[in-house]
Each structure stands twice: as structure tokens, then as C-alpha cells.
Image: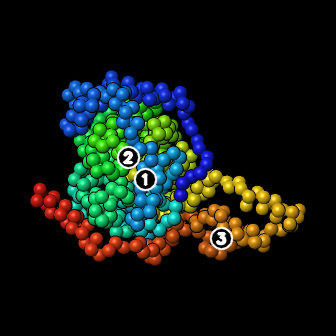
Amino acid sequence: MARMAAEYTRLGQGERQAIHDMTMELMERIGIQVHDERAKTLLVAAGAKADGVVVRIPEHMVRKALDVTPKRLTLYDRKGRVAIRATGYNTYYGGGSDCLYVLDHRTGTRRQAVMQDVVDAQIVQDALPEIDFAMSMFLPSDVDQLIYDRYQMEAMLNNTTKPIVFVAPDFEGAVAATEMAEVVAGGAEAFQRRPFATCYINVTSGLVANAEALQKCMYFAKKGLPQLYIPLSHGGVHAPCSIAAATAAECAGTLLGITLAQLVREGSPVAVPGWSGAMYNMKDMGGMYVLADSMGMTLEMGHYYGLPTFGLGGATESKVLDQQAGIEMTLGLVFQTLEGANILHDVGFMNSGMQGSLPMMAMANDVIGWIRHATAGVPINAETVDKALDLFEEVGPGGSHLVHEYTVKHFREAFYPKLINRADYAAWEAAGATSMADRATEMVADILASHKPEPLPADVQRDIHKIVEREQERVQRAK
């Protein structure tokens, strides 16, 4: 569901322009480390200058790339139906990837994640109505750590029909995940025409482009597949200690990826970062997931460039489902939605992304529903105005509309949360006097007991598992 109204803008046009000008000077005068020879060759052939590993890119190259980069990134579900139109201020929500630990809803304790947690996360994401796409959520400790992402991708494809955002630690993993998706789609051409999965490419920083990220960028561009190219920069570490400087550094890395992708194939869809550009947390060198100071900065620049954005919200630095978790989860979701993050991930993340919680995702499902209703456009038309005026006259001042057919027709349009409790005290007490965390835990247990994602055909399951087995055999030979 896309948002219809309500926007929040942190920067004025002049401020956006100033950060863009700073970004261009960074790219032209300072340069970016490009750690892949093919990528460097393509950039130099198009007009960039190389000094060893550092590449300086002139503004005309960037402008040309921006002119041909699509302003919309479209993802489908497994059935081939449009599920995400990432453009403008449309916002879609999903989980995150690769938490090392799970806050187990069964025991309330933190433990290392295993493959079953990845499967459970897909089932929950598939079932929750306000979650639009799925990610792995957990990094399983009980599979070969050299190819854990192949097992994640298999679990995602088997346990949700929603769009998938996957992460691959190496280039080979990105290729294997794409091959699995192509098997499900019925071939490479079918997947390219209606992609239901996209890769989240982690880049070292705004001014350092690592080889694996560059190789993935070129690979997906050549195949005409959408990608999320995400270099992050923090003031005091990757950039001077100011929000403006960190944002400019992040934009420089983003525009490098945009330029490279369009050199490989004009019209390649690319989404750009919608968070970070922050000053690093110097207090304890951690806790970078829920930040007030940088909120909206890179999203503003994504809108300035007219590009789809990959945001972050629904997360917390808390380690338990407490008041801090509720506050940070909600603030992140509200601000990122108002700022127009298109593909918003990490719902259910805790403790700087080290830990994930499925009950927290269930709680966020209610919050997302609330936000969507609170920010949606209000219909002003013949039904809501003219017919309502006639009804005022029919019922009369002081009359009751409670049992009128107009009320029966429209009352379901209001937001009715699944976990937020609106009962009076006596009813709440009679139902067990539960907290929202209690109810979320029960919801997750119910989903895992009853929800059955639509399975893939047996032959497709077999063929994607063969790719996982091939990858396992390959790494075994290399050991």
C-alpha cells in the first residue's frame, strides 16, 4: 500500500543544492577509491581520471547517468503481480538481514540464530499484512558460514510469496541467489521482466568502493535487474565530523554506483541510501541504527536526485521489548515514512542489528498500519460530502447514525489494530491483563502454528536446492 499524502522535508532546495555541490567537488577534486579494475576501466573510458586506485569523476558523467537512471524501481511478488513501486514518497516495509542473535519468543531469552529462525521469519513476514517484502532477518549459525546466504535465499524463496531483498557477502553469492530466483521465475528473461527479488549491496563507505560491491553493481546492471547500492558514511570515521560532510561523502559513493551502473547498461534501476550520513556515536562506538541528528538527510538527497530510496526504520537499540523499543521503533517508522523512504527495511531489528525479534515485528505491523491510515489522503467526493450532507438532513441534529446503512457501509474503513488494546479496564483484565509484548508473542506463536505460505512446486524446490548443493560442494573443494 502506497502513502497518498503528508510529507516532511528537512532541507530546503538551497541546502540540497549545497550538499550536491560539495558532493561534486568531492568526486572531481578528492576522488573515490575504486577497488576493481574493470569498474575503473569503464569509468576512465567514459571520462574519469585515475590516479592509482583513486578515481575522480567529472560532473558531466554524473549528470548523464542521472538522466538515464529510472525514477521508479518496481518489484513484483512471486505470482508476477506488482507489489512495490518505489518512487516519490511511496513507502513499503520489510524486515532486515543477518542478525546474529534472536530474542526467542518462546523463552524470552537471547540465543544464536539458526536456520529455523530464518524460516520462521519468512513465515511471519509472509503473514503480517503491513509487511510488504521479506528479508532473511537472521544469520544461521548451523550452516556453512562461507555460504550461509545461499541457505537463506532458499528459505526465503520457499516460505514467502512477497518480494525478497537479499544480501550476499561475496560476488558468487549474488550470482547464486539470482540463479535461484531465475529458476523460480521460469528463466532469466522472465525474472528480468518481473523481478521479485533484489540485492542489497553493502559498500565499504562513500569514498571507498570495495571490489565485491562494484562487481555486484556491474553484474545486476548487465542483467537489467534492480539493485540497492548502499554506501554508508559516518562523520568522524569516514568523513569529517559533521552531518553535511558525512552526507556528501555518502552521496559521492551513491553517485559512483549510479554512474557505473548506467555505463554498463543505460536504464539500470538503482535505489540509493535513505539513512546514515551521521556523525559516529563517540560515546560508546556503537548504537548507530536509530539516530535523530541525521534523520532524513540522505533521503532528502535521494529525492533531490529523483531516485528510489532504501530506508531504515522499525528498529531499536534496546535489547528487550521495553519502552525504549517501542519509542525508537515508532519514531523511526514515522519519520522515515513522512520523509518518503521507498523500501524501508530492518523492521524488528534490535541492539544495532545484532539481534532480531519477531514479536517486535508484529508490534511494528500495528504501528505501520496506524501510520498508513494517519498519513493517507482523505476522500473528499460525492459519497463523503454530498451524500453525508443528505444524511445529516435525514437523521437530523441529535439523531443517531449508529445503525444507519451508511455507517455499516463505511465503518470498516477505519484502522482497527490487531495488538493495540482499546478495551476498557475490566475487559482487558478479563482477557488476561496482557502487555502488548505478551500479545505480540502470542500472535507470532499463532502465525507459526497456522500460517502456511504457498509452496513452490516440488521440481522448483529441487532445482533451487541443487544450486545450494553445488555451492556447498564448491566451497568444500576449496577448503
Instruction: Write down the residue under mark 2.
Output: 269
* Mark 3: amino acid: Trp
Q: Residue furthest top?
A: 29
Residue 139 x, y percent position in the rendering: 32, 58
Number of residues whose C-alpha sits closer than 10 Å to that of mark 2, classed few (under 14), some (14–19) or many (20 or more): many
84 or 16, which is in the foreground? 84
Question: Circle 1: is it few (<14), some (14-19), or many (20+) Cα within 10 Å?
Answer: some
The residue positioned 67% from the left and 54% from the top of the image is 378
Q: Is residue 165 visible?
A: yes
Q: Are marks 1 and 2 in contact (CB under 8 Å)?
A: yes
Residue 235, by quadrant, is top left
Q: Which amino acid, mark 2?
A: Pro
Q: Earlier in the sequence, mark 1 or mark 2?
A: 1
Dot 2 lies on which element? loop
Q: Residue at x 62, y 56 (%)?
A: 373
Q: Amino acid at mark 1?
A: Thr
Q: In 3D space, how far apart are the residues under numbered discs 1 and 2 (Cα atoms)?
A: 9 Å
Q: Quadrant of the C terminus?
A: bottom left
- Residue 74 disc label: 1
Q: Looking at the rendered structure, which numbered label has been put on residue 443? A: none
Q: Which residue is mark 3?
A: 428
Residue 335 is at least partly visible in this image: no
Residue 27 location, quadrant: top left
* Residue 298: % across, % down: 46, 38
42 above or below 359?
A: above
Is 58 or 432 nearer to us in this picture? Answer: 58
- Which residue appears at 47% of the width and 53% of the height? 85
Front: mark 3 or 1: 1
Q: Earlier in the sequence, mark 3 or mark 1?
A: 1
